[in-house]
Amino acid sequence: MARRSAFFISDRTGITSESMGEALLDQFEGVNFKRATYPFIDTPEKARAMVQIINAAAADSGLRPLVFTSIINDEIRSIIKNCDGLHLSFFDAFLGTIERELGLTARHSVGRTHGIGDTQRYDARMEAVNFSLNHDDGISGKDLKDADVILMGVSRSGKTPTCLYLALQYGIRAANYPLTPDDLESSDLPRMVKPYKHKLYGLTILPERLQAIRHERRPDSTYSQLNTCRREVSDAQAMFRAHGIPFTNTTDKSVEELAVSIMQACQLKRRF
Amino acid sequence: MARRSAFFISDRTGITSESMGEALLDQFEGVNFKRATYPFIDTPEKARAMVQIINAAAADSGLRPLVFTSIINDEIRSIIKNCDGLHLSFFDAFLGTIERELGLTARHSVGRTHGIGDTQRYDARMEAVNFSLNHDDGISGKDLKDADVILMGVSRSGKTPTCLYLALQYGIRAANYPLTPDDLESSDLPRMVKPYKHKLYGLTILPERLQAIRHERRPDSTYSQLNTCRREVSDAQAMFRAHGIPFTNTTDKSVEELAVSIMQACQLKRRF
């Protein structure tokens, strides 16, 4: 059966038009769209080539493509508008309304100032990423006092990707501390993190899911046995509860959801 | 002077409504908005509390707030719509048009299936993040054959954050290789990466910017002298050119732009 195409087109990275388009397509379960992202469509020539691609997809499938665009330049956008697809233009939908509300004319060009603000943003990210890498898996307790948050959980509960996402997306300095079987035998908090109790946030996970992840890594080990996973998870949760440490279950959450939940729970603000 | 508020509100993480809103606000240079993001507004109670916050901001400033929402539930959205702000609703703008085009009714509820697809997505990310961490700064050449791309550049040219972003955002297995002064003395490619020439992508940077970054890390060292930076950058670019390795200058680019440019240049596809 012919599939309808969905195009995500942008004069920059396409990340916004992609996430906007995907959120809408996600509302139509069971429809299998043929997706394609085209970033950096920032000249009339590229826009005209784009129209040919869209028109070919329309002709091939006999179905009008959905064309999600995030293109600020009026000329480029108007070229795309003449394609044989349904043009869903992010800037057309909102920019005029905001201009009228503010009583101002928008600049209608890609923001490429790349001034001090961008350098600061880059530096904040770099610093946070380096911080997270240096504090991955409790490697060093030396600078935990500079951490914005310390994620704590058993091995493979999702700490590292969450820390890195917090660093890259929000410039948050996130350290992580892996709870070892030794740590879990004690009812006390591990010595290294104890002075920073107010920065701790716990991650827990469904033992069955943990077992599957650990099995991938070290099959047929004590580490990956379901009983081990059950005991570690249960001990970790008991520790979180005993010390009043907020925690969340990572099993059904995306890295994005985890990061935002942690920022909300710990009242963290983005650093850029 | 009173500042106008801009709210980014979502029933999920708020990442889409934030990037959508920021792209629009970025079109009005010189206007200093008071920004606030509210994720997980997913019940009528939370929506009503939200309206009170918006109305208070409107009353305090005497300026109608801009309210960017990405809320799929019709009831929750209609509560927000009654606030004293200008409601810029992502789903209202597009969902009806798409429903008519497809001849289908959207599900109008948050997608929380978290089935096999989500687990696969998580696994792909995890695997890519672990891969990048294991191959950060050329630590191991053992599995470079499994890399989707190998970023090459002098120390502090932006390799690590870009690798991690590619892993987290697209599940791309990105390794990186730091060009040392020893590597740069030779006109040949470094031995470790030579067999994988077709996977190499070079990063270069303005020597002045490199100097500033290195100075933060190791002030008053040979490493951070402008002359050292100039020579290393020039040698690295000569190496890229001599071997026909595509490369880009990271100085004025965000991590997002770098990641997307590299995917385009190397024809990489997201892994989830």
Image (cartoon, coloured by chain):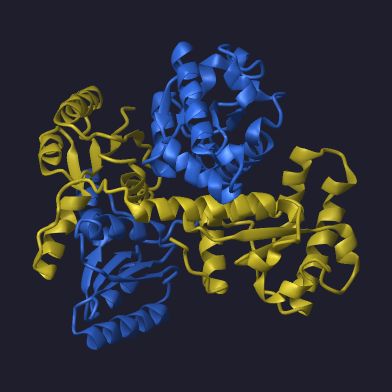
Chain colours: A yellow, B blue
User: Percent x, y for residue A78?
Assistant: 10, 39
In the foreground, A271 or B156: B156
Specify whether residue A205 is in view: no
Q: Does residue B149 sit above or below A26 in this rendering?
A: above
Answer with left or right where residue B1 lies relative to residue B249.
left
User: Percent x, y for residue A189?
Assistant: 82, 72
The number of numbered badges drawn on the structure is 0
Q: Residue at x 62, y 13 (%)?
A: B195
In the foreground, A218 or B234: B234
Q: Does residue B41 sit above or below A66 in this rendering?
A: below
Quadrant of the rendered structure where residue B57 is?
bottom left
In the foreground, A223 or B95: A223
Q: Does residue B36 sit above or below B15 in this rendering?
A: below
Answer with left or right where residue B69 lies relative to residue B182.
left
Answer with left or right where residue B110 lies relative to residue B184.
left
Specify whether residue B174 is in view: yes
Q: Does residue A176 sit above or below B175 in this rendering?
A: below
Quarter of the picture holding the N terminus of chain B: bottom left
Answer with left or right where residue B178 lies relative to residue A50.
right
Quadrant of the rendered structure where residue A206 is?
bottom right
User: Percent x, y for residue B207?
Assistant: 44, 35
Q: Residue at x 85, y 48 (%)?
A: A223
Q: Residue at x 42, y 75 (%)?
A: B43
User: Percent x, y for residue A23?
Assistant: 36, 51
